[in-house]
């Protein structure tokens, strides 16, 4: 079986339609149709960690290390989801929506395609 080949990461992270704090809907996978809040976004990996009903967990077996104070056993932690599987939740229709970007005096604002709802510009 061939080993997994890791592609080099881009120098500049690509544009991402998801930001931290967004309400999202999962489009495919085991948690399809469920909603959650984005906790953290990894733009270079094109992944995001989602909390709530849409959270995906993985189990890791950890060996005990008394010197470091680590207890052994199974640890359950959240797994990142690819952003192509996530869609922004439109608060007016309460459904998944696609977004376009508009330039305003406040900065770049995301606008829902169908309803025209404006998502506030990020406070960086």
Image: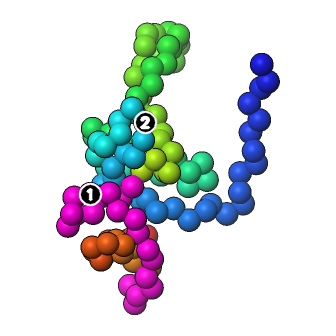
Label 2 to label 1: alpha-carbon separation: 17 Å
Indicate whether residue 101 is drawn in magenta.
yes
Up/down of 107 relative to 68, above or below: below
| Marks 2 and 1 in Cβ contact (< 8 Å) | no
Residues drawn in magenta: 87-107
Q: Position of residue 124 (x, y in %)?
A: 43, 70
Residue at point 61% right, 53% down?
44
Can you tell which quarter of the image residue 12 is in?
bottom right
Residue 108 position within the rendered picture, expressed as x and y whole percent measured from the top left: 44, 79
Label 1: which residue? 95
Res 52 → quadrant = top left
Question: What residue do we see at 39% from left, 46% from top?
Answer: 27
Q: Which mark is residue 29?
A: 2
Q: Residues within 10 Å of mark 2 (few under 14, many from 20)?
A: few
The x, y position of residue 5, in whole percent, is: 77, 35
Label 1: which secondary element:
strand
Residue 8 vertical position relative to residue 4 in the rendered view, above or below: below
């Amino acid at each position: 079986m061939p080993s997994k080949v890791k592609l080099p990461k881009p120098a500049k992270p690509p544009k991402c339609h998801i930001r931290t704090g967004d309400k999202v809907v999962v489009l495919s996978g085991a948690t399809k149709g469920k909603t959650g809040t984005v906790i953290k976004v990894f733009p270079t990996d094109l992944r995001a960690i989602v909390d709530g009903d849409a959270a995906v967990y993985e189990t890791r077996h950890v060996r005990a290390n008394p010197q470091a104070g680590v207890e052994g056993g199974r640890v359950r932690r959240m797994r990142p989801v690819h952003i192509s599987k996530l869609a922004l939740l439109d608060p007016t229709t309460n459904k998944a929506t696609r977004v376009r970007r508009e330039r305003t005096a406040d900065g770049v604002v995301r606008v829902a395609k169908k309803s025209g709802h404006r998502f506030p510009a990020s406070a960086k």
